[in-house]
Amino acid sequence: MKDVLIQVEDLKKYFRVGKGNLKAVDGLSFSIHQGETVGLVGESGCGKSTAGRTMLRLYEPTGGRVLFKGTDVFSAGSREMHELRKKMQMIFQDPYASLNPRMTVTDIISEPFSIYGLYPHRAEREQKVADLLRLVGLSEEHANRFPHEFSGGQRQRIGVARAMALEPDFIICDEPISALDVSIQAQIVNLLKEIQRERDITLLFIAHDLSMVRYISDRVCVMYLGKMMEVAPSEDLYHTPLHPYTRALLSAIPVPDPVVQHERRRIKLEGDVPSPIDPKEGCRFVDRCSYAEPRCREITPEQRELRPNHWVACHRADELFLK
Ligand code: SF4
């Protein structure tokens, strides 16, 4: 396996709400290797987007560390952070909202060049924009148009081109397909896969759609209410899920074979999602878990490696699912 590019250690991001703390991200630890694609999944509101934004310091962290090639992102000064941002980019969820409607495609894609003083000559800059447009499956003819002249999928391609402008090492894709039509989603995922392979980019792919995440990710992290529940190589997680929450999420994905689909048992998640404001000790999933026992309310489960590279935060996972 290649070197670790990003190391996330005990990452915390709390928001003050009245007299309490909304613990959106509460002690997240994981690493991503050079050239790897890691999926970060969970229901909406579980903290996955907040985690991504905090990693890039778009939100100031409450605690923890993020190391990028060994450099501590959170203690970087403004000049160092300026350089780090060049190498760490983000693709946003909503291509409709993330592109300035008054800017042409050339202006949007070349904006990072102005910020970093790159390609000062117009011809050079236009050539670079044309290269980026080709990279994402658009053409030079699109360069002088405005975002409203494009479909949702094309706009997301422009977002990908902008993220690629500074030749980053690492991109966080924050639900890049959830605002798109289903028929377009696969195209964007394929584009990201292709670019990732060609340029040896490292990706963190944030999504709630587990089926797409399986397709694009080498490893998958499952989050619930600010905590990591399970981390495993993609195929291992889908074949042998070891956390009750992951099992419930996977059971909700339809299988193309109608016979298999008919025989499958959908695990219904019982109970409400608890409030992330000042959560109690113990397992965050306890109110919805049909396997819960008294210790689950008292002791927060630690991550344990129950299969090679397969980590689970559940007191009972081995006893229940590893017989
Ligand atoms: Fe369920 Fe207990 Fe495991 Fe949490 S620790 S997932 S409550 S069995």
Image (cartoon, rainbow, N blue to C red):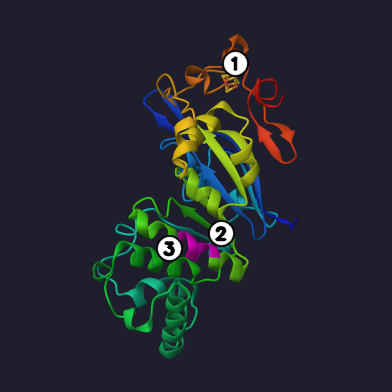
Q: CA distance from mark 2 to mark 3?
A: 33 Å
The location of residue 217, given as percent across then percent down, is 58, 52
Mark 1: is the Cβ under 8 angstroms from ligand 1?
A: yes
Magenta segment, principal secondary structure? helix
Residue 97 shown left or right of residue 129 in the figure: left
Q: SS at mark 3? A: helix
Q: Earlier in the sequence, mark 2 or mark 1?
A: 2
Residues drawn in magenta: 188-193
Count of all numbered marks drawn on residues in the image: 3
**Residue at x 24%, y 71% (from the top left corner):** 149
Residue 156 is a magenta residue: no
Mark 2, residues whose alpha carbon is within 10 Å: few (<14), some, or many (≥20)? some
Q: For mark 3, what is the residue?
A: 187
Which amino acid type is shown beneath numbered disc 3?
Gln
Residue 100 shown left or right of residue 222 in the figure: left
Name the image quarter holding residue 27. Answer: top right
Q: For mark 2, what is the residue?
A: 81
The location of residue 294, given as percent across then percent down, is 59, 9
- Figure check: 262 above or below 138: above
